[in-house]
Each structure stands twice: as C-alpha cells, then as structure tokens.
C-alpha cells in the first residue's frame, strides 16, 4: 500500500497522520488553544544571565521568557547535515570554551528561533542560529557554512550540490541542501535561495523596526508544514477532509512543488477519515502502557518527565525450537514494534529499552542492527548506544515537541502522577493507625466514626475484624462505620 498523508481538520484542531504501508507511523496534532511555535523567529531582549547554568533567559514577548544555553549559541540543533568537509555539525563545535557571560548581557537585543515548545512552567528553548527552510534549501542567517542533508547518501550528488551551493551562496550566510534537492538544477536551487533571502530580508527589516520583543517570522500551519517537510519522501497521496484546506494545499503544491507528482484528494465519505483508516483506534491505544505483539508477547511503555522505559515481555509467546530461539524471535518482533511506538507516540529524551536477556553476542548484535535499521525511517535525530550484555539499549531522541501522550493527557488528580492508587488494605492499615493515634491521645473518647470507601469498610469488617475488636475492647470505645463511594485512598476518622 502506498504511503500517504491523512489530514483531519475541525474547528479548532488539526490532526495529521503519516501512513506507511497502510499503518500510521507518525501523528501530529495542533490546536488553536495551544499553537505551535517551533521554528518561529523572534526579536528578543536578554533578561537574566545565569553563569552558574551557562544559560540566559530571553524575553520574546510570550508569557514565559525563552531559555538559551551556551551550546545553543554555538550550534544549530534544528537540522542534521554534512558539512562541506564531510564532518557533521556535531563535530564542528568550537574547541575553545565560550562562556555565556562573555556573549550575552542583560538588556541586549537578540534574534532567536524557537527550538522546543514551552513545557509546563518552562519557557521555550531558543537558539541564536536562524534557519529558514525552503523547497530545496535551508538558509542559515547567522552562520557561514555549506551543508548537505544526511538523507542524501550518494557521494557524487553531495559533491554536486556542494559545488553548486558554493558558487551561489551569498557571503556571510549558510545554506543547507535538503533531501528534496536531489536532482534539482542550479537554476532551481538559485531561485529557492533568492526566495529565502527575501524572507530573511523581511525578518531583518522587521527586527530593525521593532524596539520591543516581537514575532518576526511564523512557521506555516501544521498541514502546510507537514506537506513541505514530507514532500521529498515516497509519499504518493494526500487525503484531506476539509474543502478549504484541500484548496490551500493544492495551491501550495502548484506554487512550490509543481514538479512533484503527488495526488491530493478531498475525503467525502460519511465515516470520519481517522475512523476509516483506524487512526482513532491507534490514538486510543496510546493511553495504554501495554502493547501486544502479534506473537502473543507484549511491551510495556512507561513515560516519565525526562525518561521513557520500554520493557519486553514474553507473555503468551511459546513458539521456537528452544528457549534461545524463542527469545530471539520475540526480541526481533519487539524491536520493530518499539520503533513504531517511538515514532507514533513521539517518545523523546532518554529512552531505555530492556529486551529479554539473550546470551549469544551474535544474536544480540542482530537484534541491535534490526532496531537501528528500523529507526532510519525516523525523521527525528537519535543517538543509540550498543546493546549491553544484559539486553539493554539506551538512546536519546531529539525533543522538538513533547510526546503525544503528554499533549493529549494530563496528570491524574487521584494518583498525582504515581500511576497507581493505594489498595483497600493499605488504606485499612492507615485507618487503624489513625484510630490508635487518637486513642493514645485521650482515653476518654467513647465513639469513633470511620468514613471511607465501601471496599475499605468491607476490608476492616472482614480481614481486620479481629484487630478492630481488640481496639474496641482495649480502649473501651465503639467504632462506627459509614461506607461511601468516594475514592479508595480518601477517609476520615472522627472521635465523639
């Protein structure tokens, strides 16, 4: 089945699903209430500089000030590319250590671009490197380099693009060839560069005219940005359920990508688009931490603020001639599913994957290679360490936005982020200790009233009946139960 982009638009929400071979691979959601700002360019004013953290806060006109670290002043984290020399941008960091207090000072004006969305009480992470993407190229307005997309693996094509860009690049600017530039002529690249230079000039003029923090450049809406960023892949069709957005995408493609043959269709069926393709069902599964494998095994996904742990379990899996073959087959299947879940759920930051332990180093290597190979389809940058002898893979994945679960869910007000609630027996023991505390204070109380969930009351009257009777006899009090339907961990003990 062909790869395609499905776009669902409602009054205040846009959802985009990237389909690969009939299955949803990536999901993007944008709501009017929480607009995306990654890629936006702002004129900001430096606030507090914190030498101890080697960072600074920059007022960009939003509710929370942006946050910039010294590394973001010296490197561009938005794009992965090969430098003209063949080194990567990670390898091109300056050897000389630069201090944030030597670069920025309070009250200084700064041109910055958002790298990461604001999260919780934290402001957006910003960079002083400005990158404006076009059809074939990315213009870097504050650094002079020539770069080639990592996705362009052909050495001859990299050399050709590098040569063309070197000839036309304006002094003082940087240009990166995007994947879509494969096969593009020098004339097409020059036209794209001129358009980007026009946008940069517009940003520069706005920046000079503004005396206060202000938005200078806004990234396009989600559906246009997705089409732009995925246009160079093997996407063959775009299916959209909004007539207005359908027309806008058609016009955008005709204006910018007339040489790409991509079919755009307006979805008209009565059944909702995301229901028809099973995407809503996949979204519902994101709220569950257990993912079943076809073989009967399963994986458990636990997300924390800066860390995600994935655990592989055999479950009902019984196939294989022997134990080692069984474990190997299950781990290989799990490797594919875990990569799928990483992309679908947008798991970011540190991810630790605990495969079922396998002793054979050769088989461990094959599992690792299968995992890394599957991860090549991911557009987000990742760093993956070798699998340990205990079957553990550690990796980091680029955090441009938060995970889908973080976007769609909120902390549980009952468990307060713990992920589980106290059992009825745990609460029962808490009530017993509370009763004893009251009795130790005064021997004159004659009646104790316990208000709790009916399941807790039942536990007190059955499993803990002997303990309750002994307390009544010891202290000469009457314990009265008042069951209710409130939360299990909530109770009240009063004395009369």
Image (cartoon, rainbow, N blue to C red):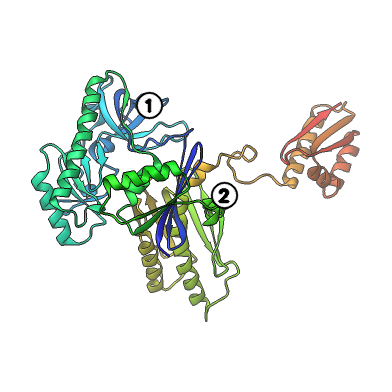
Where residue 259 appears, as percent x and y from the top left, is: 25, 53
Q: Which mark is residue 77?
A: none
Q: Which type of secondary structure does the marked residue at label 1 adopt?
A: loop
Question: Relative to 319, is 187 above or below?
Answer: above
Viewer-nearest of discs 2 and 1: 2
Marks 2 and 1, Cα distance to the nearest angstrom?
31 Å
Question: 6 left or right of 271?
Answer: left
Q: Which type of secondary structure does the marked residue at label 2 adopt?
A: loop
Where residue 407 appears, as percent x and y from the top left, is: 50, 41
Where residue 44 appears, as percent x and y from the top left, is: 30, 25
Please tell me which residue lies in front, 438 or 242. 242
Whether residue 304 is visible to the viewer of this picture, yes or no, is yes
Report which quarter residue 471 is drawn in.
top right
Q: Which residue is mark 1?
A: 65
Please tell me which residue lies in front, 393 or 178. 178
Looking at the image, is mark 2 or mark 1 earlier in the sequence? 1
Q: Which residue is mark 2?
A: 287
Residue ID at (40%, 31%) = 123
Question: 241 left or right of 478?
Answer: left
């Amino acid at each position: 089945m062909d790869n395609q982009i499905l776009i669902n638009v409602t009054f205040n929400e846009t959802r985009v699903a990237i389909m690969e071979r009939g299955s949803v691979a990536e999901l993007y959601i944008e709501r009017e209430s929480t607009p995306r700002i990654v890629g936006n360019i702002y004129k900001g004013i430096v606030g507090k500089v914190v030498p101890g953290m080697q960072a600074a806060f920059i007022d960009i006109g939003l509710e929370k000030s942006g946050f910039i670290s010294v590394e973001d002043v010296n490197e561009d984290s938005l794009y992965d590319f090969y430098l003209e020399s063949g080194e990567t941008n990670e390898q091109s960091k300056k050897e000389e250590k630069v201090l944030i207090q030597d670069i920025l000072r309070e009250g200084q004006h700064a041109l910055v671009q958002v790298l990461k969305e604001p999260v919780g009480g934290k402001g957006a992470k910003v960079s002083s490197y400005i990158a404006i993407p076009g059809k074939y190229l990315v213009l870097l307005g504050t650094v002079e380099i020539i770069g080639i997309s990592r996705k362009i693996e052909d050495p001859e094509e990299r050399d050709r693009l590098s040569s063309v860009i070197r000839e036309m690049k304006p002094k003082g600017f940087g240009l990166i060839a995007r994947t879509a530039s494969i096969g593009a002529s020098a004339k097409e690249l020059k036209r794209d560069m001129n358009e980007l230079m026009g946008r940069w000039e517009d940003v520069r003029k706005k920046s000079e005219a503004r005396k206060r923090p202000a938005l200078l450049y806004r990234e396009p809406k989600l559906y246009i940005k997705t089409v732009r960023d995925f246009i160079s892949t093997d996407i063959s069709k775009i299916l959209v359920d909004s007539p207005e957005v359908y027309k806008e995408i058609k016009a955008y493609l005709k204006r910018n990508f007339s040489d790409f043959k991509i079919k755009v269709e307006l979805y008209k069926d009565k059944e909702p688009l995301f229901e028809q393709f099973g995407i809503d069902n996949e979204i519902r599964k994101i709220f569950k931490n257990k993912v079943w494998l076809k073989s009967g095994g399963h994986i458990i996904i636990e997300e924390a603020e800066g860390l995600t742990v994935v655990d592989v379990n055999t479950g009902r899996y019984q196939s294989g001639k022997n134990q080692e073959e069984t474990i190997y087959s299950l781990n290989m299947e799990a490797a594919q599913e875990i990569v799928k879940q990483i992309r679908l759920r947008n798991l970011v930051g540190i991810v630790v994957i605990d495969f079922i332990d396998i002793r054979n180093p050769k088989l461990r290597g094959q599992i690792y290679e299968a995992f890394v190979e599957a991860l090549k389809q991911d557009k987000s940058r990742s760093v993956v360490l070798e699998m340990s002898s205990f079957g553990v893979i550690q990796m980091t994945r680029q955090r441009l936005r938060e995970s889908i679960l973080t976007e769609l869910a909120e902390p549980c007000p009952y468990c307060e982020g713990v992920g589980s609630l106290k059992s009825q027996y745990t609460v029962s023991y808490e009530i017993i200790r509370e009763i004893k505390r009251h009795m130790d204070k005064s021997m004159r109380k004659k009646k104790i009233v316990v208000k709790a969930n009916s399941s807790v009351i039942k536990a007190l009257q059955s499993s803990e009946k002997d303990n309750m009777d002994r307390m009544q006899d010891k202290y000469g009090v009457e314990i009265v139960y008042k069951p209710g339907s409130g939360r299990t961990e909530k109770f009240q003990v009063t004395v009369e």
